[in-house]
Amino acid sequence: MAETFPFPDDLLQVQQRLHEAHAAYAALCRALPWSVEPLPGWPGAKHPHTGEVIGGREPSPGYTSEQAAEEARLWALIRELSVQVCTHPYWDSLDKGPALVDARTRLKHHPKARPDAAGPAEVA
């Protein structure tokens, strides 16, 4: 039988916020231009057998100052929340070794630590 861990509520909340910050960061990165700085694109190559043009990129306008600031803010938030999870006093109550690794893994998948556990939340 798998061991259950009595995670404190504050640790579950920080893990939930970390999941939300990761999701917000991934969504932002999908919407950003492919290059931080403005760069020219390049043409694709014509496939010798099919004639299909593969590869290549359109020019990148680079990030706006608002996009760069939001990317930096979210990345800093991810780092801050990661440190809070990793240094939480709860981990000192567990023996070092496989049980600790199992507990950290279970925290990431705990139902109360999922991004949607408390409904939609804004990552602030």
Image (tube, grey):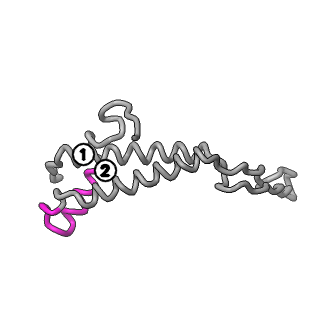
Q: Quadrant of the C terminus?
A: top left
Residue at the spot x=43%, y=48% of the render?
Answer: 22
Quick one: label 1 or label 2, which is nearer the N terminus?
1
Q: Is residue 107 magenta?
A: yes
Q: Is residue 1 visible?
A: no
* Quarter where residue 120 is shown: top left
Q: Amino acid at mark 1?
A: Leu
Which residue is situated farthest in the bottom direction here? 97
* Callout 1 crowding tier (Cα within 10 Å): few <14, some 14–19, many ≥20: some
- Picture disc at residue 93: none
Q: Is residue 45 above or below residue 10?
A: below
Residue on which disc 2 sits: 108
Left or right: 103 as drawn, with respect to 78 = left
- Picture disc at residue 12: 1
Residue at the spot x=58%, y=44% of the render?
Answer: 66
Q: Amino acid at mark 2?
A: Lys
Q: Nearer the viewer, mark 1 or mark 2?
A: 1
Residue 54 pos. (x, y %): 78, 53
Magenta region: which residues? Answer: 92-108
Residue 78 pos. (x, y %): 40, 53
Q: Is residue 19 above or below residue 87?
A: above
In three-dimensional space, the C-alpha distance between marks 1 and 2, rounded to whole angstroms, equals: 9 Å
Q: Nearer the viewer, residue 15 or 124?
A: 124
Q: Are marks 1 and 2 in contact (CB under 8 Å)?
A: no
